[in-house]
Amino acid sequence: MNPHAYPPEDGDHPFVPYRPDLPSDEQLLERGRGVLDRMDRRRSVRMFSTRPVPREAVELAVEAASTAPSGAHQQPWTFVLIGDPGLKRRIREAAEAEERENYEEGRLPDDWREALAPLGTDWQKPFLERVPWIVVLFEQRYGLDESGERVHHYYVKESVGIAAGMFVNALHEMGLATLPHTPSPMAFLRQVLGRPENERPFALFPIGFPDDDCVVPDLRRKTLAEVLVEVRPEE
Ligand code: IYR
């Protein structure tokens, strides 16, 4: 038996064939352009409609996000779903109390305030009550086995960040809107939602349809040339 074989030959961790249909180069580019076109239409929304969203739609997006790759395949995330109006109000009130400190009481440093100016945000977060659903994504700092023993989780931020991005895109692909929102600080979410000690809020996602009169800041995205660098060995 070769101890360095891949896949390992010990049989303890079975491997199965993975044979996705491979596109031609032409199909690859056509699909790539389609993906870019659709993703480029996504905008973060702060003006939501009150139109109800079927719970199953959000469940599908969570299931899609939970296919994300994660450190040691530990999937160190919990998606907490809130549709109850009373809970949404409590989240809004607690988030606004924190943000009021930021915006009105000088807790936001000047450079941060300047960076936010084009977004036109302030301490008020009415969308937290208006949306049909809120999902709070928690990172599991460590896991708990059947006997309650701590299990180390690897690359938690990286894993949960990838799941968050996939969640945003899943919602967008379905025709829903969201705003990755990080009321700051957001420790209150663990108390309000009664989550266990090992979970820490990572981001909050109000979910719904954009309102009929929704507007978004007229932002430009960085061009490919601004974000892509190819490194080649010096000749
Ligand atoms: N959490 C605050 C401030 C804020 C911070 C960033 I970075 C933004 O991109 C937008 C807002 C708020 O939600 O208003």
Image (tube, rainbow, N blue to C red):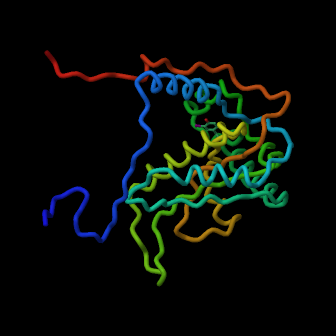
Judge by depth and name the residue closer to the eye, 47 or 210.
210
Q: Please tell me in which quadrant of the rendered image residue 34 appears.
A: top right
Quadrant where the N terminus sits is bottom left
Residue 179 higher or lower than 12, as above or below: above
Frontmost residue, 214 versus 92: 214
Q: Where in the image, quadrant-wise, is ligand 1 located?
A: top right
- Taking depth in this image into account, of 93 and 7 the one nearest to the observer is 7
Q: How many marks?
A: 0
Give the left or right position of residue 165, taking residue 44 as reference.
left
- Which quarter of the rendering shows the C terminus? top left
| x and y percentages locating residue 213 in the rendered image | 85, 27
Q: Position of residue 52 (x, y in %)?
A: 84, 47
Picture coordinates of residue 75, whole percent (x, y): 48, 59
Residue 113 lies left or right of residue 151; in this view the side is right
Vertical placement of 19 versus 113: above or below? below
Residue at 41%, 35% in the rendered image: 22
Name the residue: 71% across, 64% down: 192
Q: Nearer the viewer, residue 8 or 213?
A: 8
